Amino acid sequence: MAELKQEKTFWEKLVQIDRRFIYLIIALAMTLPFFFQMGLPIPATKEVKDIYDLIETFKPNDVVILSADFDPSVSPELLPMFDAMFRHCLKAGVKVIAMSLYIQGPGLIEPVINQAAKDYNKVNGIDYAFLGWQYGYNLVVINMMENLKQTFPVDYYGERTEDLPILGNVNNYADYDLITSMNGSSTYMTWLLYAHEPYNVPMACGVTAVSAADVYPYIQSGQFIGMLGGLKGAAEYETLISEKRMATMGMEAQNWAHIFIILFIIIGNIGFFIIGRKK
Amino acid sequence: MQLSTNIWVWLGVFFTLSVLSFLYKDNPFYKLAEHVTVGVSIGYAIVLWWNLTVYPRFIIPVFENGHFILIIPAILGLMMVLRIVPKWSWLSRYAICFTVGGGAGMGIPRSMQASVLRQLEATMLPLSLNSATGINNIVIFIGVLTVLIYFFFSKEHKGVFGGAAKIGIWFLMVGFGATFGYTVMARLSLFIGRVLFILQDFLGLNLAG
């Protein structure tokens, strides 16, 4: 006997929709805004502005260390942060030292450094230093607090760090005015434990949005001066330095994706309650 | 629009689409991209490790400057690698002893200071209803206290104690909600990075502004 097939209601069909349709809608929602930019405002939050304001107070001989502690899997979020902060340091005329505790970090930041140096007409070894990577994570941080040039005997291009004019008077923790680690895990803790706590070096961090909620307690306690959280943090920094670059472009797409996700959550929950009540 | 003529950009696009094709279903292109990523990452790491660590920090100091003391940590490093030789794998334990002992010795007191004492200090705040900061401080104080109560399992969660634990759950839920929101944002950002790569680097579209 042929079984009677019960017709599915609209909500039942909607709740059981193939998730690949949702992927498609989200993909379109995130691609189209690149062609139709609405220029939504991206005001800077206090956590981001505090870092910017501190760098603005620096004098030409002050030293900012930017550590790109990330790999390609999180670079869409963290590379724009590095780009924005590196540009701000060049613009402010402070001594900026770029490095990484992650082996894949230097390869990712090299093109960004070169482009920024070209745009601001700055020279490697004189206006900034690119130290590359060293093995050891916490050992690198501990050593560079004691002796930077011994920790990094050569820079990324194989030049002896002793010979770099920018590092002339930069030797240890007493010479660092700000350290900012951009990381996709909890590498900021390495810097906090071995740079900030024992030597009181001012610290900030740039983290992926996933980790941002974990960092707030350290800002509230005053251990971090500020934080750039995810692509939004990078876009806020770009707003502050008045340069619309990678992050600002991406935020428009992100806003639209958020709108669609919120709609999906609302529709999904309505469907869930309607179906649940019927049963 | 000016299509890229760079072979590496084309390869990047191929692997990007290969990885994204997993969203439709598992397939050989995805597997290929996965294996290439692992292989390339390791190859890249070995080259940098040699150029930036072994050569300037071991080969030159030992063979050119005569710092023979560095041979001791180098031997410990080799002992660690002996894990892959079953007959000699026991030797790796000596190297591990140094790593674990040193790591714990350096890490425990600092973690206590940074993540416990400083965080405790940050909850000892002036409480007041007369300013926004004072009210924030009250929220922080209640949040820390009730969450700690929720994680105290030596007393049954009943009465006033149970009520405080329930408030603690609400604070935890707000925390989880914020983390989830940030996680969604992070995952979308990764996709945005790839879209930008395809539109700008591959298709050569000028999206600035």
Image (cartoon, coloured by chain):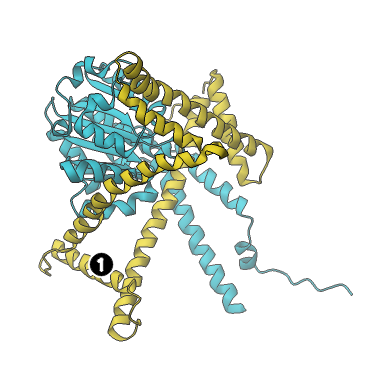
Chain colours: A cyan, B yellow
Q: Residue furthest right?
A: A1
Task: Check disc 1 and report its element: helix, strand or loop.
Answer: helix
Residue depicted at 60% across the width and 30% down the height: B14
Residue B115 visible in the picture: yes
| Of B52 and A182, the residue lying toward us | B52
Nearer the observer, B190 or A259: B190
Q: Is residue B197 above or below residue B145?
A: above
Q: Residue at x 51, y 67 (%)?
A: A269
Query: Can residue A157 be seen here?
Result: no
Where's residue A65, x and y in %? 24, 32
Residue that numbered label 1 is attached to: B144
Q: Is residue A154 left or right of residue A265?
A: left
Horizontal and vertical percent position of residue A38: 39, 41
Residue A17: image location, x then y, percent = 63, 58
Above or below, A80 against B22 in this view is above
| Residue shown at 57% from the left, 26% from the top | B11
